[in-house]
Amino acid sequence: MKKWQSGLLLLLGLVVAFCLYVFIQLRTIEVEQLSDDLFVLRGLGGNTAVLRTDAGAVVVDTMMLPMQGERIRELAGELTGKEPALLINTHYHIDHTHGNPAFEPGTRVLSTERTLSHLKALDAEFWQGDAARLLPTETFTDRMTLNVGGKTLELIHPGAGHTDGDLVVLFKDEGVLHTGDLMFNHYYPNIDLEAGGSVQQWVGTLENLLRLDFTRVIPGHGETSDRAGLRQFLAVIAQLAGIGRTAAEKGWTLERTLETDQLTADAGYRRVRMIFPLPMNREFVITRAWEETTGNFKRLD
Ligand SMILES: [Zn+2]
């Protein structure tokens, strides 16, 4: 075999191995049981919750590919012994919604009104053709109480933060709150200023969450947490909000703001990984805080 031929073979082998690795990563979903009826599914993308009710399974968020949605649908059936009756999307980002099209058209899908408008305006290309059949079918603005198959769920839009349309799901019978991306557990959060996200408002939004009655927390990314974990995340967001305000008051440049870094509550925080680590790190969150208070960003809708 010529040298270039064996080089090509090696390259092909590497490509195949990488594709296999990605495929396995996408198919791998770890299950954690929080109560008799409530499960967390963890894989590449945001955390999914599955609740067993007498009327069928309730699924919160669907990760980032229809193929993951397939797996979530299978697991929801296996874990609850019921077909999915209802999907809830906490917000519009692809790693929480792109699994939706794997579900049966006609499935009830809930989100806030803002989330539906972001899906249509900011992710329009994906939500065309058949996929559009799994867009939210019912929306609300501030709060909605759901009684499904003997379970009570409160869906609440507690204010802006990660975007301006996030909802949280309070599983009342289980005392568990799914925060969507309003909480990242020991990961640097994405702050989507372009879709109405706000570090400044995120503080009050998290304070609103802490007024709710729950003991455990399913964050958008990371391990299952609790009230203390949510308060810890609030400490990071509150510091970032302070950094943004100080920078604007003193007229600091971004460079000066980054040099004068007063973020200390983020010990142990990492970058979210999805195959590769995402660009959200310490510098990213401080930059976003600065961009918000100095007006250096552009709303997309
Ligand atoms: Zn998100």
Image (tube, helix red, strand yellow):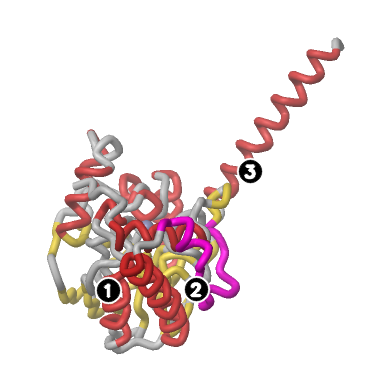
> Of marks 1 and 2, which one's residue comes earlier in the chain?
1
* 139 in magenta: no
Amino acid carrying label 2: it is: Gln
Residue 282 position, x and y percent, is: 52, 62
Task: Please say if 11 is above or below 215.
Answer: above
Q: Which portion, as a residue range, is magenta?
A: 253-272
**Residue 32 seen by the camera:** no
Disc marking residue 189: none
Depth check, front residue: 230 or 102: 230
Query: Helix or strand or loop: what does disc 2 sit on?
Result: loop
On the picture, is 197 further left or further right than 272?
Answer: left
- Which residue corresponds to the image point at 57% horizontal and 64% vertical from the top-left? 270
Q: Which residue is mark 1?
A: 54
Residue 292 falls in image quadrant: bottom left
* 257 in magenta: yes
Q: Which residue is mark 3?
A: 21
Amino acid carrying label 3: it is: Tyr
Disc marking residue 262: 2
Distance CA(mark 3)–CA(mark 1): 38 Å
Depth check, front residue: 234 or 93: 234
Task: Please say if 270 is above or below 152.
Answer: above
Residue 28 falls in image quadrant: bottom right
Residue 34 position, x and y percent, is: 46, 79
Prevailing secondary structure of the magenta residues:
loop
Q: Residues within 10 Å of mark 2 (few under 14, many from 20)?
A: few
